[in-house]
Amino acid sequence: MNTSAEPVNTTPPRRSIFSRTTLVAFFAGAALVGGIAAATAAGIGACGFHHGTSGLHSGADVSEHVDHMLKHMYVEIDASEAQKAQITPLVKQAVNDLLPMHAQLQAAHEQALRALTGETVDRTALEAARVAHLQLADQASKRLTQLLADVDEVLTPAQRTAVAARLKNMHVRS
């Protein structure tokens, strides 16, 4: 029983078109696909997410960045020449598979912005952009997971432990 003089608000709270989960998924997908070349290298021990790929414009820039990140990882885990010969093509193929997703992400992002900035909110286009972001994030996650498993098969248990420690340290710092 309400004994205070204030009226009770019976109006249900207004729901935003963006739930917290949708926003998290949207930004996670954007971060994942937008920085995918660096993330590929980061996934196997280098610090790629912190470097980002915003300055990478050409395939040569991306390839140079990946080579740089791999060089650091190889030193950290004391990789043999045979391991380097196996890992480098795995990473480069994954990067080639993932890079086209960046353009798709940009298109979905632009679609979402158009849907939000029109005279009225285009909920259908906004939902399509959200779905596209989630699909891209899922595709990138699957490909990155495949890469991690492929690389882990090349590494020794001690090297995998070193990579895991490096990844854990990256997450603690972020």
Image (spheres, rainbow, N blue to C red):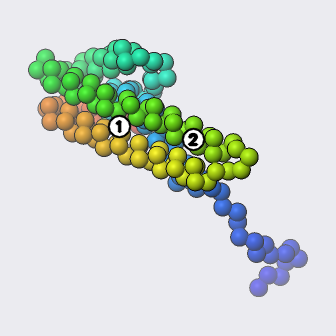
* Residue 94 screen position, x and y as percent: 28, 31
* Residue 151 screen position, x and y as percent: 20, 32
Q: In this view, does 54 lie to the left or right of 92?
A: right
Q: What residue type is labelled 2?
A: Gln
* Residue 56 screen position, x and y as percent: 44, 19
Residue 12 image-quadrant placement: bottom right
Q: Is mark 2 on a helix, strand or loop?
A: helix
The residue shown at (36%, 14%) is: 60
Q: Name the residue under label 2.
A: 111
Q: What element carries label 1?
A: helix
Q: Mark 1 points at which residue?
A: 168
Q: Which amino acid does label 1 sit on?
A: Lys
Residue 41 image-quadrant placement: top left
Res. 116 visible in picture: yes
Res. 72 visible in picture: no
Q: In which quarter of the image is the N terminus?
A: bottom right
The residue shown at (51%, 36%) is: 107
Q: Considering depth in this image, is 103 or 47 the residue closer to the camera?
A: 103
Q: Which residue lies furthest to the bottom in this view?
A: 1
Q: Distance between the residues labelled 1 and 2?
A: 36 Å
Q: Considering depth in this image, is 130 or 90 the residue closer to the camera?
A: 130
The residue shown at (48%, 18%) is: 55
* 168 versus 60 height, above or below: below
* 122 versus 9 height, above or below: above
